[in-house]
Image (tube, rainbow, N blue to C red):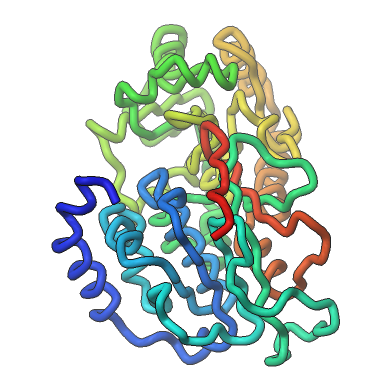
Amino acid sequence: MSLKSTLRYPFDMPRAKKLLRDKPPVPATASDRPVMLDLRTEQMLFDCGRHLAVLAIHADRIGSSFWLRCPKKILAAIVRKRYGAMMLSMPHSRWLDVASDESIPAGALVLGDFDADVSGASPNSSDATDPNDASRPVNTWRLRITRDPVPGMISLPYPMSPGAMRLTDDAVLAKLRRTPDRAGIFFAGNLSRRYAHAKIADQFDVVNRVEILGHLHEHFADRLVDGPAKRPADLVLRDSQTDPIVIDDWMATIARHRFFVCCPGAAQPKCHHLIEAMSVGTVPLIEYGDRLDPPLRDGVNAICFRGKSGLSEAIGRIDALSDDQLERLRVAAIDYFESHLRGEAVLQRLRDTPEESAPHQLCLAFHSHDLDLPPTR
């Protein structure tokens, strides 16, 4: 444990226990076959602990409670992360100390961050085919946090932000997808200095966020409006630091526009804005569409470009699109989201139909570099 963590431990542990205690009980419908995150490292705490909350939300949507098993020092570190605290406060989440001898329910899905038998439970079996069979063995998978998808390994799709996920169930998405009178090209996001770092170009060969927005301001100044967009040519660019959008309005704001400028994140290209846009049928204007699996297709479910000059050319192509072409793009973006970006569908498949083939690992290709698994316990 680092010195900082040691000093904060007496304050963080009570906070974590309070979050776990002061919430409604686990819903009875989500207690039979939990999803358990079994952690021995702080690897999952990257990106403000975003993916801890995402996994918990996915579990809730497939009808599972969410169990966290980890040492107390990891629990204390989790509660310091914005989204880690969100995960602990969810009604269906609970914590188990690694010293606990509580048995894991049959049919549970266990995801671990160490290179060992994650749960110490029975291996997977192809004998149990009924997803509701209480005799099913615990299904264990190892998490691999990587820069790129690993060939032959199942990948969890990059998610929306946890705040947006919690506010957009299927009924909300269906309504937003029917938003009338869409217009213009939209961006809103953080433009702090860390989004101007050269490592995005050096490591991934894409233009960084600040340069993309600077190019649009320089070359399309006559199209800029304060918003909302009302004409097809309108360009709305908002810096969330100076002109924030409250989370309750975020998805509806995206859905009022035809296109979203999908700038890269600070350390790697994938960003939750892309997923949120496609979920409501707002078409991505994107340079890194080839980093999705399968790749986005230019003119089919996205407008793709390369470099700053390619961005200008892409906007010219958008201007020439007919109403029918715009509608086909909108529908195709939604279809792509439903087919390839539903993380809960992947989680449910792992829980209900465990795969027998090696390496029996789940890839989270969300990082700027690969994080190696720690040695076997």
Farthest residue in the front direction?
A: 377
Tell me residue 286's x, y (percent). Answer: 59, 27
Q: Is residue 138 above or below residue 358?
A: below
**Quadrant of res 166:** bottom left
Q: Nearer the viewer, residue 233 or 254?
A: 254
Q: Nearer the viewer, residue 254 or 336?
A: 336
- Who's the residue at 38% across and 75% down the image? 97
**Quadrant of res 77:** bottom left
Q: Can the viewer see residue 50 in this picture?
A: no
Tell me residue 330's x, y (percent). Answer: 65, 43
- Who's the residue at 31% across and 29% down the image? 239
Q: Is residue 342 above or below residue 64?
A: above
> In the figure, is residue 256 to the left or right of 125?
left
Q: Is residue 243 above or below residue 350?
A: above
Tell me residue 80's x, y (percent). Answer: 26, 54
> In the figure, is residue 192 to the left or right of 119?
left
Identify the image quadrant of the C terminus: bottom right
Tell me residue 343's x, y (percent). Answer: 61, 58
**Quadrant of res 117:** bottom right
- Who's the residue at 21% across and 74% down the image? 18
- Who's the residue at 15% across and 52% down the image? 7
What number of labels is visible? Answer: 0
Q: Is residue 100 above or below residue 161?
A: below
Q: Can the viewer see residue 329 in this picture?
A: yes
Q: Nearer the viewer, residue 242 or 31?
A: 31
